[in-house]
Amino acid sequence: MKLNKYTWIFVGLIAAVYLGTLLWVRLTNPVYLQQNMYRTWEKSYVMHPRADQSFVNTSTNNNHQKPVALSESQGYGMWITIMAAKKGWASRQDFDRFVNYWLAHRDYVGDVYIDMALAQAARQWPSKADYYRSLAKKLSSDILAYEYNPQTRALTVGDWVTKDSPYWRLMRTSDVMPFVFKTLAETTGDSRWQTVNNAMLDRLVDLSRQHQTGLVPDFAWITRNSAKPVKPKTISTKQDGSYDFNACRVPMMMAVSDDPRAQKVLRKMLRFFSHQQYVTAGYSLSGKRLVKYQSASFSAPIFFAVSHHRGEGFDNLFDSQKYIFSRPLTRKNYYDATLTVIAALEGLN
């Protein structure tokens, strides 16, 4: 039977209402959204080379034939699994698979995110607290032995940087994690973490003061008393001295800290973003857009930060950056997807 145009119009309206309803449910039901995003992320990016091991695939376009594991992604995977476990969507066994993979490959998989996750696991699963706390203390000692510059009192950008390296005084701004450092100081009893926290936060404050925007660069040269942005292509890309794909995590790192310095840095950045028509994927430190497009890697940390500071004059950012949840989670970009899931699990509570 041939359908007339009115029938097609009716069918189109029904479809539009159906899709609109799905979108409404997605955006107004945080639990549904959180669980759906976590399940999609876990299915898309978590790989199991053995039944008792897991790692997060960071390869370009999420290539499962040539997967790549990084210490950063392993830490993110462990952190996300703990957040999911708190909601009943993941188990201790799920977390232990990440731990087992790290233990089997710790010569090149180990960083502060993993250390933080182990410290959190000790609180999440008291029956294995001693085990997780022991691992956290050992990893903490290794980090401070191989990734700490006693001259600047800050963490270096990796254990491959030695005192003879030209990058000995280089700081990655997204490595300034006051809440994490505080957690490690409490878990390990090692006061050096407070020293690291003070030194790195002070340098971040120095960088924040240098521009009215409050934006900080991906990387900076530091001394014990000063910091300055690096020049283009110092270590990675032409945007090394800009607010780019490393510094974009800084709002997330500052958001849950109760340190006044962290909150000062965060609020200055959020004031800048709150006056933007829309947030793009990168800025010069003076506030010039580097590109015209948006990216969840930039918007997710801002949403995460604003969600912890509702009612402080930044609610327009909470609404505008929520666009990252209005579309399916990407299955081709580990970084975008992971930061979005973290923002959903923590920021939509």
Image (tube, grey):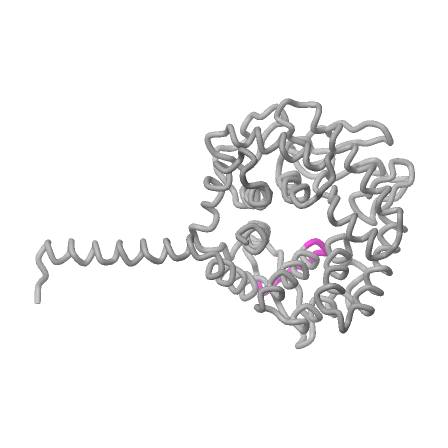
In the shown orientation, is residue 90 left or right of residue 98?
left
Q: Quadrant of residue 90?
A: bottom right
Residue sitting at 74 percent across and 30 percent down?
A: 205
Q: Position of residue 228 (x, y in %)?
A: 76, 27
* Residue range corresponding to the magenta coloring: 64-72
Residue sitting at 54 percent across and 38 percent down?
A: 311
In the shown orientation, is residue 183 left or right of residue 22?
right
Residue sitting at 80 percent across and 47 percent down?
A: 158
In the shown orientation, is residue 70 left or right of residue 167?
left
Where 11 sits versus 53, above or below?
above
Residue sitting at 44 percent across and 55 percent down?
A: 328
Q: Position of residue 293 (x, y in %)?
A: 48, 37
Where 324 sits versus 2, above or below?
above
Q: Position of residue 53 (x, y in %)?
A: 69, 71
Q: Is residue 261 magenta?
A: no
Quadrant in the picture for the N terminus: bottom left
Quadrant in the picture for the C terminus: bottom right
How many numbered circles are shown?
0
Residue reaching furthest to the front:
311
Dominant SS type (magenta): loop
Where 315 sits versus 24, above or below?
above
Q: Quadrant of residue 70?
A: bottom right
Q: Position of residue 316 (x, y in %)?
A: 48, 36
In the shown orientation, is residue 242 left or right of residue 295?
right
Q: Quadrant of residue 187?
A: bottom right
Near-viewer residue (131 or 3): 131
Near-viewer residue (279 or 256): 256
